Image (tube, coloured by chain):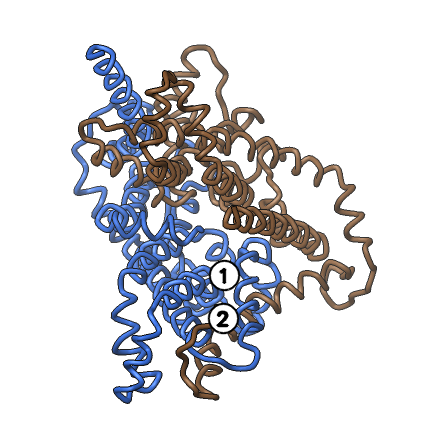
Amino acid sequence: MSRRAIFPNRLLPYLLVAPQMAVVLVFFYWPAAQAVVQATLRQDPFGLHSQFVWFENFSRVLTNPFYLGSLRVTLVFAVAVIALAMSVGLVLAIHADRQVRGATIYKTLLIWPYAIAPAVAAALWLFIFHPTIGMLGRTLVRNGINWDYTLNDQHALLLVIIAAAWRQVSYNFIFFLAGLQSIPPSLVEAAAVDGAGSRQRFWKIIFPLLSPTTFFLLIVNIIYAFFDTFGVIHALTRGGPGKATETLIYKVYTDGVINLDLGGSAVQSVVLLAVVIVLTAVQFRYIERKVHY
Amino acid sequence: MAPRWRSGNWTTHLILLTGVVVFAFPVYLAVVGSTSDLGTVSRGELGLTPGPYLVRNYVQTWSTGSGERIQGTPVRRMMTNSLIMALTIAIGKISISLLSAFAVVFFEFPLRMFFFWMIFVTLMLPVEVRIIPTFKVISDLGLVNTFPGLTVPLIASATATLIFRQFFLSVPDELVDAAKVDGAGPLRFFWNILLPLSTTTGAALFVILFIYGWNQYLWPLLITTSQQMDTVVIGITKMIGTGEALVDWPIIMATAVLAMLPPVLVVILMQRWFVRGLTETEK
């Protein structure tokens, strides 16, 4: 990464990196180190006394049935959001990639939801699915379905999944479309000349060539479903009813901020940190391999 | 062959139109809700056409943020907070990243790679996974309920640095040599040559970072306890409360429409940079 032409100054480069290093040290490394330390301490409720307890917090948290329940909720939620957002995004991208009239307008009309905050998306869907005032919520109730997301676990989960996936579709759409447009048309035409039908062309040519995009989106969507959906859940269900929509990140928040269990919350932060690091590492390994090919 | 083509086109239009409608419908309904009166909405009689109260509801939302049943902060205030937050984060990130990328690419100094990796690793530490300790740092510094506390921890990010580094590496050596021959020092080179060259990259990043800043949720929720500091995204959740039927839905929906307006406009008006910024920053 070095270049030949450089400036010879000695002090200046340090001054230039100083602002970023200051922010990074104070707000990234110091808190992350704190989280790791905190995770090995037990504190009394007033924070006056703390004791080093090795991995006791880890074993306490990781065997806690509530934590395992939250893990299960997160997995169900993440799989549903990712499957929904990615498949719809892909279908829309495939069709927007075709040479139809108005393709540019369609593109504009399909990318803007990305700009909507997850919590605002939640408010919009609540207004539709509210059991007494929402248009669809009311319709469901009138038709004999006992729709109430504040009481029914599955209804609550379904609502947060829809709100979370809705906004993410346009993100996946943008990337799938960019991926499709980078596939040389000659390849697809050659397959067509050889007599491959459109289904075959898709599964045998386009889908494999799209796999780097798909893989990248999978990682980004996992991170989205795990972390960025906090706003959706906080705005809609606050983790309820009971703990039906309490995802891991939501539990970090409730344990740390509401229940003031700092050790337990720190352990969960460290576990999530490990998840992000593994995902990022996997992604970089993969991208590196792709470059070498 | 011809009829088959036509039918293919027809399904394509159908699918794309369905997508457009599924995206637009919730927003349309929010607009309808925001122009109706409270009674109509609470009785569940909302139709599909906008009501007559557009001006009244939006004026009320903008200037008081309160209705018959909720006491809120004026949305004007919350929008200003969101705007300050989004602009500070976007401009702050771009500025410090430009400087550090400049240092890493155009200078040779001890610990250069060490600094680069220190920045690079932060790519893996989203604010959400270290909220509680970061909150403690901010409260120790006495920055709770202040704009620096709200924005500075979100300013550090590796993405912008990496993007600028990538771009700087593509600047030809000859350009640097030419500047040196003409007697330009590093700062002059940075200001007069590098910065003008970076505008497209900068604009693309700005769009992405503005949306990122505007849509922040968890961090403002923790760091702002005073109503005067609420951002508009947080404000909506506070108005909804526990989601009872008896809140001022027209006011909430007007707030939601106002809250999504700036980022959506930025995306639509700067679409070209947006798509470029997005597909480049995430790689």
Indicate whether B179 appears above or below B138.
below
Q: Quadrant of residue B125?
A: bottom right
Q: Observer-nearest residue: B257 or B193?
A: B193
How busy is the neighbourhood of tag 2: few (under 14 within 10 Å), some, or many (20 plus)? some
Indicate whether A26 appears above or below A132.
below
Q: Residue at x 39, y 20 (%)?
A: A138
Name the disc covering residue B143, or none: 2
Judging from the image, mark 2 belongs to the subunit labelled B
How busy is the neighbourhood of tag 1: few (under 14 within 10 Å), some, or many (20 plus)? many
Q: What hue represents chain A?
A: brown
Instruction: Report x, y in % for residue A239.
Output: 57, 38
Q: Observer-nearest residue: B154 or A217?
A: A217
| Tag 1 and tag 2 share a subunit | yes
Mark sitting earlier along the chain (1/2): 2
Mark 1: secondary structure? helix
**Mark 2 belongs to which amino acid?**
Leu
User: How far apart in space, not on screen, are marks 1 and 2 (Cα)?
Assistant: 8 Å
Left or right of residue A254, residue A230 in this image:
left
Chain that appears blue: B
Left or right of residue A172, residue A272 in this image:
right
**Mark 1 belongs to which amino acid?**
Ile
